[in-house]
Image (cartoon, rainbow, N blue to C red):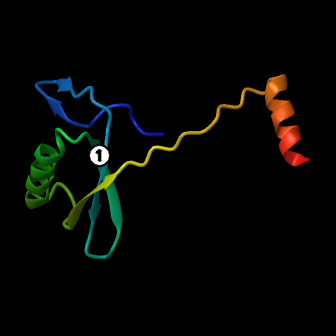
Amino acid sequence: MFPEHCSFVFDKRRCNLPPEFIIEINDNDNNKFMIGLTCYEHKQKLEAKFVYLQREKHLPEGKINFNPIKIIHTNCITGNQEDKDEIQLKRL
């Protein structure tokens, strides 16, 4: 599960937009570190901040990647009689 909101904070106020990208760092040993989530609106600002943090040695060196979040929808199974009947029908 991911947080419901972007990782961007300004003046102690969090962004209320849903995240659209996973922010990762690929280091020189091909390790990946997830460092945050961002909406499209704050993508460039967070990238600039993370580049700065890399220069100051607060984050590992490496390429900063923005991977789009893929949303997966599933049918909710509640365990009622309708769900049991549907499962039984699909087994036959």
Q: Say which element carries label 1.
A: strand
Which residue is at the front of the view, 49 or 88?
88
* Residue designated by label 1: 36
Q: Position of residue 59 (x, y in %)?
A: 20, 57
Taking the image as shown, residue 25 lies to the left or right of residue 73, namely left
Residue positioned most to the right: 92
Which residue is at the front of the view, 4 or 57?
4
User: Hey, what amino acid is under mark 1?
Assistant: Gly
Q: Quadrant of residue 52?
A: bottom left
Q: Is residue 30 above or below residue 65?
A: below
Which residue is at the front of the view, 24 or 68?
68
Taking the image as shown, residue 25 lies to the left or right of residue 41, namely right
Q: Residues within 10 Å of mark 1 (few under 14, many from 20)?
A: some
Taking the image as shown, residue 39 lies to the left or right of residue 32, namely left
Q: Position of residue 11 (x, y in %)?
A: 10, 25
Q: Position of residue 40 (x, y in %)?
A: 21, 42
Taking the image as shown, residue 62 lies to the left or right of residue 92, namely left
Q: Quadrant of residue 64?
A: bottom left
Residue positioned most to the bottom: 29
Q: Position of residue 90 (x, y in %)?
A: 83, 44
Residue drawn at (11%, 44%) of the image: 45
Residue drawn at (12%, 53%) of the image: 53
